[in-house]
Image (cartoon, helix red, strand yellow):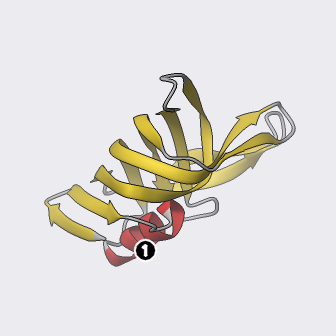
Amino acid sequence: MEHRRINNMIYAVLKKDEDVFDTIMELAKKENIRGGIILTGIGMLKEFKIGYWNGKQYEELFIEKNHELVAFHGSISYTDPILHIHAELAGPDHKIIGGHLISGKVDPVLELTIIDSGIEFKRKYNEKTNLKELSIL
């Protein structure tokens, strides 16, 4: 991964076979991001899992073949889950699949734009939704 910070903006380029979650979490730690917004992600992923929240759990779908990112955005908090990312990806048939990104590897590249909000984001469990929701401190 290569990255550069200019004020509260962080630009990063993830390389082939890097794990999306591990690499973004490493970047958040290096840059001490305790509350951030992933604005954009451009590139391709392979071996990724996409989830759909059915109200109780994520229904997961694993895709092995490369897909192009059409949309990629999320939040970074300092409590688990640290990353909450949604993605839409297009396959070779030009059909879109999307939802909650659970895992994935970069292939060949992923360009990111992240804002460090300067405030802390925490996740709190909500019994009504059965989710750890974002709380802005």
Residue found farthest to the left: 6
Residue 120 placement (x, y as % from top left):
44, 58
Give left or right: position of 19 versus 111: right
Q: Can residue 124 be seen in this view?
A: yes
Disc 1 secondary structure class? helix
Compared to residue 128, the image places residue 33 above or below, namely below
Compared to residue 51, the image places residue 137 above or below, namely below
Compared to residue 22, the image places residue 130 above or below, namely above
Q: What residue type is labelled 1?
A: Glu
Image point (41%, 47%), residue name? 44
Give left or right: position of 78 versus 102: left
Residue found farthest to the bottom: 30
Image point (49%, 34%), residue name? 89
Could you tell me how many numbered marks the image carries? 1
Q: Can residue 119 be seen in this view?
A: no
Compared to residue 56, the image places residue 111 above or below, namely below
Residue 137 placement (x, y as % from top left):
49, 52
Image point (54%, 22%), residue name? 95
The 10 Å Cα crowd at callout 1, few under 14, some 14 to 19, many 20 or more, is few
Residue 78 placement (x, y as % from top left):
52, 65
Image point (58%, 31%), residue name? 98
| Image quarter (top left, top right, bottom left or bottom right) of the N terminus | bottom left
Residue found farthest to the right: 56
Q: Front-most of 135 and 63?
A: 63
Residue 86 placement (x, y as % from top left):
53, 39
What residue does disc 1 label?
Answer: 26
Q: Front-most of 100 and 84?
A: 100
